[in-house]
Amino acid sequence: MDFDVIEFEETEHVGPGDEAPDFTRPLVNDEYWQDASLSDLAEDDPVLLVFHPMDGDFPATYIWQEIRDREWLDYDAELVGLSISTPYEHKTFIRDWRDFDDFRFFSDPANGVAEAYGIVHDLDGMAGVAEPKPAVYLINEDMTVEWAWVAEEWPDFPPYDAIEDELADL
């Protein structure tokens, strides 16, 4: 593939030991969507929150194919994605990748959640358009960030083995 690597500007983002910003957004699955809050998901189990570029972008597809192949739904954590894609775009993403039927995605078109987490990336050449940097947060039942990774460049992919180690320790 022919693309430029883009270094992200450093930001002060939410990290381990910080309280995870709570939010309520549409949570989309293969059948429907409804508003849900992060804190409600975290009540019973830790949450693995995966921020990804908009649906259809190759990094988003690659990230979720890797997660699928590694069977992260088998761990004792609520696994959810989040991007600027609308609920309709998430439904298409799930439909187009039939193996994604068990995944759920928060929809945040205004990118407010990424802003709260300090991981906004303004898209080059698109005035007023931003998306979250790829990032992964493991959040416990008290809404404390236990572990975090935030991309330093585009494209950059999560450290899958390190995340699996964290999930295995739950």
Image: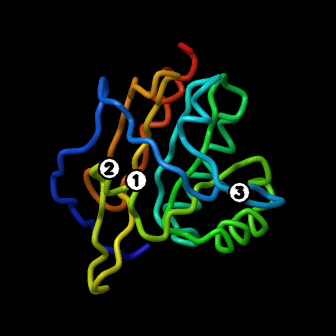
Identity, as a three-letter code, of the amino acid under mark 2: Ala
Coordinates of residue 137 in the picture (x, y in percent): 43, 37
The answer to whether residue 117 is left or right of residue 80 is left
Residue 83 image label:
none
Quarter occupied by the C terminus: top right
> Label 2's element?
loop
Residue matched to label 3: 34
Identity, as a three-letter code, of the amino acid under mark 1: Pro
Residue matched to label 1: 134
> Label 3's element?
strand
Quadrant assignment, res 75: top right
Quarter occupied by the N terminus: bottom left
Q: Is residue 170 above or below residue 109?
A: above
Q: Residue at x 64, y 73 (%)?
A: 89
* Camera-side residue of 161 and 90: 90
Q: Is residue 110 above or below residue 78?
A: below
Q: Is residue 53 above or below residue 113?
A: below
Coordinates of residue 31 in the picture (x, y in percent): 84, 59
Query: Could you give the CA–CA distance between mark 2 and mark 3, rounded to whole angstroms?
Result: 29 Å
Give the mark nearer the N terminus: 2 vs 3: 3
Q: Residue at x 53, y 22 (%)?
A: 141
Residue matched to label 2: 151
User: Which one is in front in this view, the residue at disc 1 or the one at disc 3?
Assistant: 3
